[in-house]
């Protein structure tokens, strides 16, 4: 697939989810997103009010993570966090599903967890983070089937805070299961142009990364990061 590096900007959720992220860093994130035309900034819910204030006149959306990074909280708590983040200016929500319940085969509990957050989101797009590195293929498939049935906006590979991030194989599996109606977001370890293109070729329609500037410049990103 031939996509010029600069054209990848609209695939990218420009991401800063570190616990110690400062306002200065969030301001830089928002400025970079506007300068380079990234689709959104992705931040923790507590950073949404500030990010939204900086981007109020911009085309860049604010994406908030919910139940992050473990996904092990109460469903009502996740739903409340999503609702509050949206009220504060979030235009997309990325939730972590209940990974333990999925591994236990408690699919109704997983479904209800996702459904509660989706209901709280209303018309705001919901992405569901699977944390694929902790799952086998059958569990990934079950999660994607639930997300497809619930008509969420995206399934997403990873938080970037667990053992590893997105893989081409996982993106391809997720795309196969959800079909064309649901987006696939590759996140975690997408740090350079070559990897970004590989994820898109496998079926990703969004990229979560803190290396967006390196990606759209066609350069290799150095070091680690989301």
Image (cartoon, grey):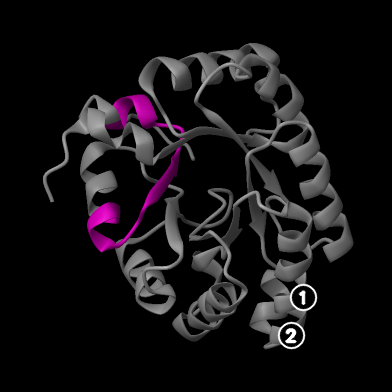
Residue sitting at 70 percent across and 26 percent down?
A: 20
Q: Is residue 212 left or right of residue 162?
A: left
For this orientation, the residue located farthest to the left is 2
**Between 122 and 79, which is closer to the camera in this rendering?**
122
Residue 16: % across, % down: 57, 31
Dot 2 crowding, Cα within 10 Å, few <14, some 14–19, many 20+: few
Q: Which structural element holds mark 2?
A: helix
Residue marked by disc 2: 108
Task: Indicate which disc residue 112 carries.
Answer: 1
Farthest residue, direction front: 123
Residue at the image position 69 percent from the left and 15 percent from the top? 23
Point out which mark residue 84 bears. Answer: none
Position of 115 relative to 27 (above/below) = below
Secondary-structure class at tag 1: helix
Is residue 6 toward the left or the right of residue 180 in the image? left
Do callouts 2 and 1 mark residues in contact (Cβ within 8 Å)? yes
Q: Is residue 63 left or right of residue 76?
A: left
Q: Quadrant of residue 131?
A: bottom right
Please tell me whether residue 105 is drawn above or below residue 189 in the rendered image: below
Residue 218 appears left or right of 20? left
Q: Which residues are magenta?
A: 199-215
> Which is more toward the observer, 208 or 57?
57
Write the residue at 50% across / 66% down: 133
94 relative to 17, above or below: below
Within the magenta stretch, is there residue 69?
A: no
Residue 37 % position (x, y): 39, 24
Residue drawn 67% across and 24% down? 52
């Amino acid at each position: 697939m031939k996509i010029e590096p600069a054209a990848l900007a609209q695939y990218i959720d420009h991401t800063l989810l570190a616990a110690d992220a400062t306002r200065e860093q969030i301001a830089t994130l928002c400025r970079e997103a506007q300068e380079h035309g990234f689709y959104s900034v992705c931040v923790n819910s507590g950073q949404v009010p500030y990010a939204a204030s900086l981007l109020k006149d911009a085309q860049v959306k604010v994406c908030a993570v919910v139940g992050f990074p473990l996904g092990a909280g109460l469903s009502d708590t996740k739903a409340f966090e999503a609702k509050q983040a949206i009220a504060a200016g979030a235009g997309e929500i990325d939730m972590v599903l209940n990974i333990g319940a999925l591994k236990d085969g408690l699919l109704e509990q997983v479904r209800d967890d996702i459904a509660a957050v989706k209901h709280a989101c209303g018309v705001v797009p919901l992405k569901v983070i699977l944390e694929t590195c902790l799952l086998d293929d059958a569990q990934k498939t079950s999660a994607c089937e639930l997300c497809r049935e619930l008509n969420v906006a995206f399934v997403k590979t990873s938080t970037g805070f667990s053992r590893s991030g997105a893989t081409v194989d996982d993106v391809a599996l997720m795309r196969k299961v959800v079909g064309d109606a649901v987006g696939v977001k590759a996140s975690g370890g997408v740090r350079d142009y070559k990897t970004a293109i590989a994820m898109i070729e496998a079926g990703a329609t969004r990229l979560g990364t803190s290396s967006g500037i390196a990606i759209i410049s066609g350069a290799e990103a150095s070091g680690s990061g989301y």
